[in-house]
Image (cartoon, rainbow, N blue to C red):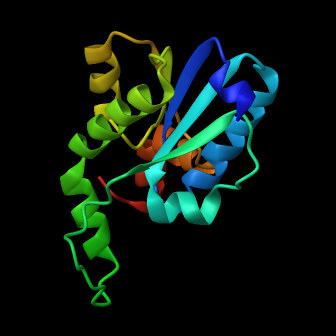
């Protein structure tokens, strides 16, 4: 972690924890960290997501846990939407608190945000902190194609 502490720039990644969002985002940040040797990267997701996707041997990337929104003592009851609902009710407050922890623990202000495109609130946080940001879409090109050409698709399947 020595190179993490001595970095001149600080980039923070806000990662969506459900589905396959975190893994491609982490891979992207890993590639950036290799290309930017004097930059520290902080990766924000829930503890469960960080534990399952984050290797322990990364020198310039540190994971930080964001509260998952689950009530204390929560027991999963079989409804897969329930944890998602709790998490979405916790945003953006949980990320704002985690960002404060990141700045405090690293002692470095944030220079740039990379935000999972799923998090519209990330732009508001970046604007409030007056730092540049970019949204990153990790889904396949086909998903983007469907969004761009939805009118053509709707026409061909008969949806007005």
Q: Nearer the viewer, residue 98 or 148?
A: 98
Q: In the visual, does 51 lie left or right of 6?
A: left
Give x and y (percent) for residue 45.
Answer: 46, 50
Name the residue rendered at 75%, 19% in the picture.
36
Q: Is residue 143 visible?
A: yes
Q: Is residue 154 above or below residue 48?
A: above
Q: Is residue 64 above or below residue 18?
A: above
Give x and y (percent) for residue 130.
Answer: 33, 9
Q: Is residue 157 above or below residue 108?
A: below
Name the residue rendered at 48%, 55% in the picture.
156
Q: How many marks?
A: 0
Give x and y (percent) for residue 103.
Answer: 41, 26
Q: In the visual, does 131 lie left or right of 63?
A: left
Q: Nearer the viewer, residue 107 or 35?
A: 107
Name the residue rendered at 32%, 60% in the picture.
68
Q: Quadrant of the N terminus?
A: top right
Q: Nearer the viewer, residue 18 or 73?
A: 73
Q: Is residue 155 visible?
A: no
Name the residue rendered at 35%, 40% in the picture.
98
Give x and y (percent) for residue 9.
Answer: 60, 14
């Amino acid at each position: 972690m020595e190179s993490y502490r001595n970095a001149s720039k600080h980039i923070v990644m806000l990662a969506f924890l459900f589905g396959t969002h975190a893994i491609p985002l982490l891979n992207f940040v890993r590639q950036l960290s290799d290309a930017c040797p004097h930059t520290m990267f902080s990766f924000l997701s829930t503890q469960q997501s960080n534990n399952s996707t984050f290797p322990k041997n990364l020198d310039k990337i540190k994971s930080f846990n964001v509260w998952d929104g689950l009530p204390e003592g929560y027991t999963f009851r079989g409804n897969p939407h329930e944890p998602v609902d709790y998490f979405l009710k916790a945003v953006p407050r949980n990320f704002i608190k985690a960002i404060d922890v990141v700045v405090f623990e690293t002692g470095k202000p944030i220079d740039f945000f990379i935000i999972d495109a799923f998090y519209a609130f990330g732009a508001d946080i970046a604007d409030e902190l007056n730092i540049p940001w970019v949204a990153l879409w990790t889904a396949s090109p086909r998903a983007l194609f469907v969004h761009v050409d939805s009118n053509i698709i709707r026409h061909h399947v008969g949806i007005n």
